[in-house]
Amino acid sequence: MLVRPSREDLHVIGYYLGRIFYVVAAFTVLPLLWALGGREWAPASSFVLTIGAFALLGSLVASRPPRERKLDWSHGMVVVALTWLIVPALGSLPLALSGHFGRSLDAYFDAMSGLTTTGLSLVQDLDHLAPSLNFWRHLLHFLGGQGIIIAALSMFAGGAGLTLYYGEAREERILPSVTSTARFIWGVALVHLIFGVAALGAIAHFVLGFSSIRSLFHGLMVFFAGFDTGGFAPQSTSLGYYHSAIFEAGAAVMMVAGAMSFGLHFALWRGPRRADTLRNLETRTILSTFSFCLVVTFIGLATLGLYEGVLGLTRKGLFHVLSAHTGTGFSTVPSSELATWGGLSFVGVALAMALGGMASSTAGGVKALRVGLTLKTLKDQIKEVLLPERAVVSHAYQQSGRKRLTPRISQAVMLVSLLYVAMFLVGAAVGMAYGYPLQHALFESVSAGANVGLSVGVTDPGMPALLEVTYVLEMWLGRLEFVAAFSLVGFLLSWVRGR
Amino acid sequence: MMRRLLFVVFCVALLLGVALPAGAQEVVVTVEDLLESPEQYTVPGVPEVVVHGELVGDFGRRADGIVWAQLNGDAYAAVPLLAGGDLAGSNLGIGVRIPADLWPELADVAQAGGYRLRGPLVRLTGAWRYHDPARGDESYLDVTGIEVYSNPVLLVDEADWPPFVLGVLFLCAAVMIALSTRRRQRER
């Protein structure tokens, strides 16, 4: 029997949602300051409205504080799922008011894409967009990539930390407390921010010959989109705009750093556990899948004969497989050219997108640990069939120490992996229903569901609204890795049908 | 008014640009043509193409005396959104490689088109290098001739008061609700 949520349940959820909205309102002050500094009056007005909307909604939902501020598992999941639906809704206000979007749904699509670090975009005339709005789009990457909840947890936690932390698809607690883990994650991001912006800005200024202010702007935007594996770019031609292998290499370093789990960052920073990290199942899996996808793509591109030189083929193939596998979505070729990557090159890039980065990173996709555990489960099953009955098959794996692969873990891992596959197929089916060829529909669906952002041109301001909604849902589900989203559905069902 | 004026300037400039004497080998194309059928216009089959559009983004002035920029050939070059132009889809842009000595006046142009600035409208002549092996298979227009037929135009971004007023009202309401919530909590 379903139990209808009580008022106290709603008060608990509202209380924490309110706190999170306050945090987002505080972050929105940054683009407001940018707009005021640049005398961008219309965007500045829209940021004031957004701050006001977040603050008002936050105060309204938190206006009935619960008697006990204890957040149980289901509350936490509902808070997370609602946060990731409502923040893009209000966060899309400056975009919708900018006049660069055909309909409000397009602006919501872009805000969801920004927050979930997907990078697909429906913005029109990006090349004339106000810098403060461009900053807002990229800041959404940063907020979403680091985790809005993580941001909130850094400032307030109480007893609510753990459930909110896991709800946002974080699987690894690096330090003993969730608050200290959240602060560590933001610390890592800030250190990378300083070095990343300095490096990319220096390349833009000294190598590409941009003015100093514009170099800083490009460095900051590309850092946000690269480190948070987002994929938005400040200009319409993505990273092809820079015409520089050095700049692409700089962005690639950011993408790799972003796709690494924060646990791995911690191990690399702290030293003694460095050697262990290379033995971890997750690290070995991602290195293997990346190499596999790269080889497949190279063979595919060589077969197609699109690129004449070995250097060009290597540069294009390596960059796009890296962009796909880390879930970033930067591209150095127009989407019309990417659409011609057929055969094995399509398989290599699409597979890389679907597999994704490491767990507890800013990347999307199925994630390397799940892929590794799925393969390990299959390998063990095959061994059990092939070996004599009395043979003992080890079900252990190395991941920050020796761990046992229990049937329960195997089931959970395979279930989520299958859900991803099902989601990709449903998205592709909707695309095909609108007349897009299978290859393009599947590519775009995987790109949306795995939060990548590479596009073969299906994502376009003129795309059907239903397909747009499908991609929005895919981005949301992919980012939350299903659990929090299903909890919200369960909560709503209990509300309607419970007693 | 601004919209009409810009449109007329664009059309006249475009006509003037097209009417200029062109070499026998030149093929007049649009940026869209180059993006949709890039291999059709590439060297050596087509030695030179002529393409019109707006220079946007940054002028990347490199140490080797080359300036890189982006040429957009979309509807926003004619009438930018800030001047009342209509939405017409995503930008259509290609990279252009301009030898600095080909356009000495470029030193005086600080910024290409962007927010509040419709960039210079140009008629570029050059070789379309599709997947140039010498540059890691990049595609770009190797410019050999440039003519600026409309200088950059500053656009006005007017303040939008209704969202500002609504935002301030929302903030005031939020503060009042938060204060009232805190008072009720204390009374409990």
Image (cartoon, grey):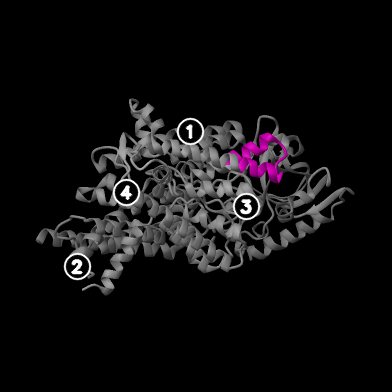
Q: Secondary structure at mark 4?
A: helix
* Residues at discs 1 and 3 both on one chain: yes
Chain at numbered mark 2: A
Magenta stretch prevailing secondary structure? helix
Given contact means CB atoms under 8 Å apart, are the residues at marks 1 and 4 in contact?
A: no
Q: Which residue is mark 4?
A: A407
Single out the mark in the foreground, 2 or 4: 4
Instruction: Determine which residue is flagged by label 3.
Output: A335
Is B90 left or right of A480, judged from the image as shown?
right
Horizontal placement of B76 versus A384: left or right? right
* N-term mark: 1 or 4: 1
User: Is tag 2's residue or tag 4's residue first in the polypeptide sequence?
Assistant: 2
- The answer to whether the residue labelled 4 contacts the one labelled 3, judged by CB atoms less than 8 Å apart, is no
Judging depth in this view, the residue of A488 and B49 nearest the camera is A488
Q: Which mark is residue B179?
A: none
Give the extent of the magenta segment.
A297-319
Q: Which chain's residue wears label 3?
A: A
Magenta span includes A137:
no
Residue wearing tag 2: A7
Q: Chain of mark 1?
A: A
Mark 3, other Cα within 10 Å: few <14 / some 14–19 / many ≥20? some
Q: Quadrant of the C terminus of chain A?
A: bottom left
Compared with B67, A144 (above or below) is below
* First in sequence: mark 3 vs mark 2: 2
For disc 1, the marked residue is A198
